[in-house]
């Protein structure tokens, strides 16, 4: 129970900090993964064990990439090609991982497979500060809530956490979009100021 509660508290703090675009969210993210690895192992959710282990590394990379002093810290949209790629990765990955987990004692192999792949994709795009990460997280959090609710040993606190995260994903999307638009406006203002006065008349 302590693992579940601790992961829930850390997740709420991380989710809020990510929503307001704070780099420190990755610190809470890393610690949350440590608790989730232990929790998932105890509940035989092997896909989540692997997933969360990878997250430890991705959390460190995310913290580095979210350096406010470089261009990679800017929020941008995915291209059409990127959207097609992440959709196909989630589709094919869910089939492959779910099929593999079905050979184990995982109680929810296909649901575990989907949440495993979709959350990896969502985390990657969060590292890259892509707006669409919150669309993926929204869907992912819904299915995670279902997974934790129907587990043989119901994870009630993690179920509630994912309900809250689903709501926060919506808020995060609109807040990031607002920040992105403000950043685009600032870039345009800087570009305009750098244009010689003589050229602005044309």
Image (cartoon, rainbow, N blue to C red):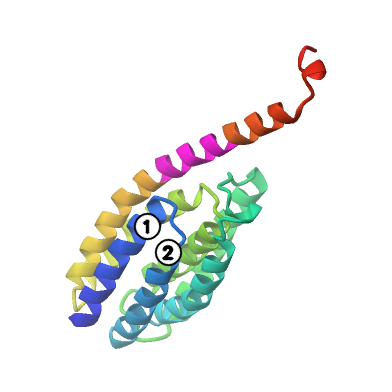
Q: Residue 192 sits in which quadrant?
A: top right
Q: Is mark 1 on a helix, strand or loop?
A: helix
Q: State yes or no: residue 142 in magenta.
A: no
- From the viewer's side, name the closer residue of 179 and 2: 179
Q: Residue at x 53, y 35 (%)?
A: 181
- Residue 64 vs residue 25: left or right? right
> Bounds of the magenta span?
173-184
**Residue tagged by mark 1?**
17
Residue 56 position, x and y percent, is 47, 77
Q: In this view, does 130 lie to the left or right of 5?
A: right
Mark 2 and 1 residues: CB-CB less than 8 Å, in contact?
Answer: yes
Q: Which quadrant is the N terminus positioned in?
A: bottom left
Q: In this view, does 66 lie above or below 112?
A: above
Query: In this view, which residue lies farthest toward the front?
Result: 197
In front of the other: 200 or 65: 200
Tell me which numbered mark, 2 or 1, is placed earlier along the sequence.
1
Residue 45 appears in the figure: no
Disc 1 crowd, CA 10 A, few/some/many (<14, 14-19, 20+):
some
In the rendered image, residue 188, in percent from the top left (x then y), is placed at: 65, 31
Instruction: Tell me if residue 176 is in the magenta stretch.
Output: yes
Q: Nearer the viewer, residue 12 or 22?
A: 22
User: Could you classify mark 2 by the number of other residues whose Cα lies within 10 Å: few (under 14), some (14-19), or many (20 or more)?
Assistant: some
Label placed on residue 145 = none
Q: Is mark 2 on a helix, strand or loop?
A: loop
In what quadrant of the picture does the C terminus appear? top right
Along the line of sight, the residue nearer the viewer: 156 or 7: 7
Residue 24 badge = 2
Q: In this view, does 19 lie above or below 179?
A: below
Most common secondary structure along the magenta stretch: helix
């Amino acid at each position: 129970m302590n693992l579940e509660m601790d992961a829930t508290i850390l997740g709420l703090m991380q989710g809020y900090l990510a929503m307001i675009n704070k780099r420190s969210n990755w610190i809470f993210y890393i610690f949350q993964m440590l608790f989730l690895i232990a929790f998932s192992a105890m509940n035989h959710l092997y896909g989540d064990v692997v997933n969360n282990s990878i997250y430890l590394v991705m959390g460190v990379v995310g913290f580095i990439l979210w350096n406010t002093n470089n261009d990679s810290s800017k929020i941008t949209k995915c291209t059409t090609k990127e959207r097609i790629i992440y959709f196909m990765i989630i589709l094919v990955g869910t089939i492959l991982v779910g099929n593999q987990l079905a050979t184990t004692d995982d109680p929810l192999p296909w649901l575990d497979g989907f949440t495993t792949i979709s959350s990896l994709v969502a985390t990657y795009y969060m590292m890259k500060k892509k707006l669409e990460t919150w669309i993926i997280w929204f869907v992912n959090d819904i299915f995670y809530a279902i997974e934790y609710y129907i587990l043989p040993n119901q994870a009630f606190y993690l179920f509630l956490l994912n309900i809250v995260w689903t709501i926060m994903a919506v808020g995060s999307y609109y807040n990031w979009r607002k920040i992105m638009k403000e950043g685009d406006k600032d870039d345009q203002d800087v570009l305009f100021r750098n244009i010689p006065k003589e050229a602005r008349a044309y």
